[in-house]
Image: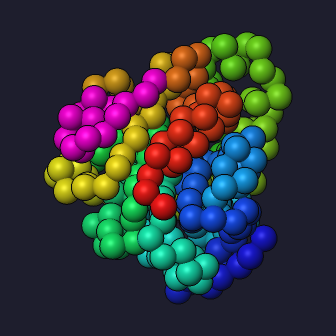
Amino acid sequence: MATILSTDAQLYYEVVGEGPSVVLLHPFPLNHKFWTAIVAQLSSRYRVVLPDLRAHGSSELGDGPATMQKLADDLARICREEKTGKASFVGVSIGGYLLFEFWRRYREQVVAVVLANTRAGAETPESKALRLQVADRVLREGTAEFIEEMLSKLLSKATRTNRPDIVDSARKMMQAMSPDDIAGVQRGMAERPDSVATLAAINVPALIIAGDEDSVPRSEFELMRQQIAGSELRVIPHAGHYAALEKPEECGALLRGFLDKLPR
């Protein structure tokens, strides 16, 4: 893996393949290994950049909460280091949250976006309070109970029942985060800005992906589809919030089909 220092944190990432740049942004609280089963479908034609987001995987938390502003600036540093130029970006969950911020700050670098298992709206007062409570709880009690709650909430019933290998893979990625890491990211997400007004400004090709058992309500995906001109919504059957991990062949085919249609 490559490393880069971003203001107050050491960041890790991988680069695989040759061709137009595609940046894959994993969900919380996983890391770049989330994409392992999909990279081979893309790297035969694309240069795939795989960051560990701040506080995830091998990347450090740095000082204070992992805000979307910090994550977007981290991403910009990695893109400059790797000379990605105009790239396509795929963001899952928190990866989507930071893509909205990246678009507001660095849209000239974006040739296309995929928004997967994410939402544009800010936290409600209730969900913000819950994130802050979880941050305090993991610092007090550790991460084990939190991880099991996440697995039961974010993976589909079929995955939890029939694919213990996927469940174990997700668990191991989550276990790589310390209580400080998880708390820092939860506090950063609690403060994320509302991005609904940003949707209408997105004027590049856009694909929206949901799992049919996603923890994000379908109405959130429909809102993005309606507000981003020309965007398309695709729903992956028997998948939850981690659709790309649960159904890599289906998700990889969607990504490859979308990217292959872009002008080169």
Residue sitting at x 78%, y 38%: 169
Start-end of magenta stretch: 221-235
**How many numbered tags mark residues here?**
0
Way the structure is coloured: rainbow
Residue sitting at x 46%, y 46%: 261
Q: Position of residue 15 (x, y in %)?
A: 71, 67
Seen in the image, is 13 located left or right of residue 70?
right
Whether residue 229 appears in magenta in the rendering, the answer is yes
Image quadrant containing the N terminus: bottom right
Hey, which quadrant is residue 56 in on the image?
bottom right
Seen in the image, is 49 located left or right of residue 258?
right
Vertically, is 227 above or below 156? below
Residue sitting at x 23%, y 49%: 199
Q: Nearer the viewer, residue 52 or 210?
A: 210
Q: Nearer the viewer, residue 151 or 50?
A: 50
Q: Position of residue 38 (x, y in %)?
A: 69, 43
